[in-house]
Image: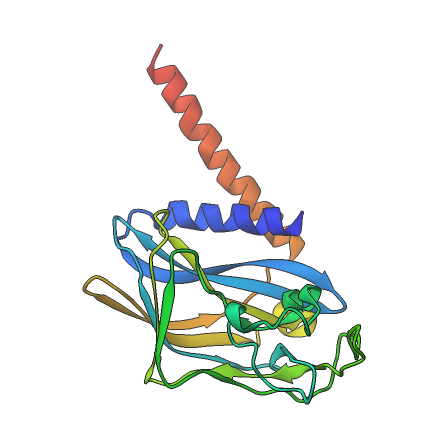
Amino acid sequence: MKRKIALSLVAIVAMVGSSFAGIGVNYDWKDLGNGLIQFRWYAWGSDGDMPHTIDGVCTGGGQGVHNVALPSGGVLATVFDTDWFEPLMDPALKEYDTHFITPPGGYQMMGVMPEETNDGANPAGLPAANAYMLPYLTGLGTLSSSAYTTFTFTPDPSGQTYFLQTVVTLEDAMVGNFFISGWIHGDGIHQPIEMPLILPEPGTVAMLVFGGLCLIGIRLRKKIFSNR
């Protein structure tokens, strides 16, 4: 339900901003339980502008993003979806991991590889080992790239391409301590990313969604009466 509300909110924001040409980033969210909130960040474009490149992405603020390390020594190798070694890592833990999302249609990473850190604190109390009794390393840290890291992808025809999943504590999500930064590029457009993460209170979300529905209802009513 919360995810649907968030998607409705994003849709309303998109309608409000559709009159402005450009590119940018936004997010939707899901409550994972265990005191963790998952955010999926997407690049969007309007009026035909299609984002195709992200670089210099860094996470910061708050307690840090939640990372899950591979078993067998806690190797930090889950920066990308395609690096998730399924035979050793429980696939269900991907929901709790901060990583770049490799979109359908292909991607290419050039330059310096992103890096992540992990304090091993396991704040959500996730399983400490998999079926092979190999240890996990779950905790809070960072995910960062440099100015020399470039993530290019084939744009989604809808103009909305997911590129990053971040998982943070509920506390950080509620108070807006967390943010991402970097750059997003389209054809001839280069836009800085400085995006604070703010989880709206349920009452605020409900008012925004209700307000958006009212505006749609007023527009439909005017259209009906104008056609009489």
Q: How is the image coloured?
A: rainbow
Residue found at x 52% / y 36%: 213
Q: Residue at x 65, y 51 (%)?
A: 2
Task: Name which quarter of the figure residue 170 lies in.
Answer: bottom right
The front one of 12 and 150 is 150
State the image coordinates of residue 65 (x, y, percent, origin top left): 60, 78
- Which residue, as the protein is rendered here, is positioned at the far top? 228
Say which quadrant the C terminus sits in. Answer: top left
Q: Is residue 200 above or below residue 18?
A: below
Q: Residue at image x 32%, y 85%? A: 148
Residue 109 at what x, y percent from top left? 37, 75
Q: Say left or right for 128 vs 70.
A: right
Rendering coords of residue 169 (x, y %):
67, 73
- Vertical relation: 92 (above or below) 205: below
Out of 27 and 107, give the one closest to the viewer: 107
The quarter of the displayed image where residue 24 is located: bottom left
Q: Is residue 63 above or below residue 197?
A: below
Task: Locate residue 173 relative to residue 33 in the image: left or right.
Answer: left
Give me the residue at 53% from left, 68% from top. Answer: 81
Q: Nearer the viewer, residue 84 or 189?
A: 84
Residue 116, position as x, y percentages in the image: 54, 84
